[in-house]
Amino acid sequence: MTKRKRERKSLNYFDKIFPYNGDCEIFGIIGKPLKHTASPAMHNALFRKYELKGIYIPFELEKVDLKLFVNFSRKFLKGFNVTVPYKKDVMKYLDEIDETARDMGAVNTVVNKNGILKGFNTDYLGLKNSLKEDLGVSIRGKNIIVLGAGGAAISAVFLCVKERANRVFLINRTFEKALKIAKKFKNRLDIKPLFLLDKDSVERAFDESELLIQTTSVGLKKSDPLIINADLLKKVKYVYDMIYKPNPTKLLAAAKKRGCKISGGIGMLCHQGAKAFQMWTGKKPDINLMKQIVEEAVFK
Ligand code: ATR
């Protein structure tokens, strides 16, 4: 391609993603790293589909710039998402925090209403909707295993609180982290922290449970090992992995082989994004379109 053609092509591309002259609302996502986030593709496609004058930009930030960004956003952005590692840190700079987000101790969506920044958390609702839509399963009255005790595990445990699970087994490599989460929710949920390497207790948890929700980062790399004995998966009916790439993860492939109904995390990603989009624009977006866009963006 000649230099001139290349320039023309890139101008056309810019026009496609930013077709307005100043008359446009700005949204975005903060986090680090953001190189692989599918959120800009997802939201920008929705703005185009619904002919809304909006643009969604990734802002990869250092922690020292968090306060600066929040003050900037108060003037110039209509809203933004927050991802790892700032879901907790961002809270101290916002003007208001919704009760659920405060309870979870994490914000993933900020709405700017006339210069007042309010933080919400749509992650646990994203998980709830995806479990229903992609696995046909609800939490109520069930015994559930949550694997992992990091930030992502909080959404799963919180959903179990809200939807009244019967019992939760919280299994983690570092027992103290599982214990800390269990202590936080113990008055509202029957929750048992377990050490990943305590084979007998882990096996008993599988004997008693119907659904496994995988929240660790293990599985993101194709070379990652399984951290539980694959044959335990025979004991549960449903396995949900919050990881969406690769799809299926090694865990999901092993679970499928053993007769489980499985789902990866694309639905959760789309549903949390749909909720945020609705808060910002008042429009309830088409989930199937979002799934299609994300799959294209993530697996291209
Ligand atoms: P996130 O906010 O995405 O949940 P995180 O807070 O770093 O990220 O948590 C990652 C989770 O993956 C933790 O539960 C972590 O276990 P530890 O609490 O013991 O660190 C889990 N994890 C990461 N690598 C692991 C491995 N190789 N084996 C078992 N668990 C692992």
Image (cartoon, grey):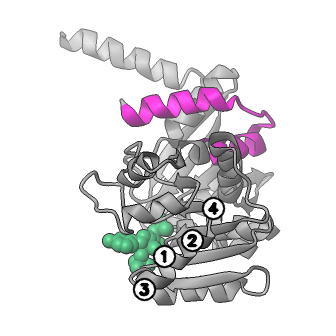
Q: What stretch is highlighted in magenta?
A: 270-299
Is residue 284 shown in magenta?
A: yes
Residue position for label 4: 210
| Drawn side of residue 273 relative to residue 39, left or right | right
Query: Relative to 84, does residue 42 appear above or below in the rendering?
Result: above
Could you say whether the residue bearing mark 2 is in a helix, strand or loop? Answer: helix
Residue position for label 2: 207
Could you say whether the residue bearing mark 3 is in a helix, strand or loop? Answer: loop
Answer yes or no: do the residues labelled 1 and 2 have beta carbons within 8 Å? yes
Q: Tell me the kind of residue under disc 3.
A: Asp
Q: Tell me the kind of residue under disc 1.
A: Glu
Q: How far is disc 1 from disc 4 in space, using C-alphas?
A: 13 Å
State the mark number for residue 198: 3
Answer yes or no: do the residues labelled 3 and 2 have beta carbons within 8 Å? no
Q: Quadrant of the N terminus?
A: top left
Query: Relative to 252, does residue 10 appear above or below in the rendering?
Result: above
Residue 80 lies, in percent from the top left, at 62, 51
Q: How many marks?
A: 4
Residue 69 lies, in percent from the top left, at 55, 60
User: Sequence-wise, which precedes: disc 3 or disc 4?
Assistant: 3
- Judge the density around disc 3: few (<14), some (14-19), many (≥20) Cα neighbours within 10 Å: few
Instruction: Please name whichever residue, 21 or 81, is drawn nearer the observer in this view of the structure.
Output: 81
Instruction: Please name whichever residue, 201 or 66, is drawn nearer the observer in this view of the structure.
Output: 201
Could you say whether the residue bearing mark 1 is in a helix, strand or loop? Answer: helix
Query: From where the camera sits, is residue 85 visible?
Result: no
- Type of secondary structure dominating the magenta stretch: helix
User: Sequence-wise, which precedes: disc 3 or disc 2?
Assistant: 3
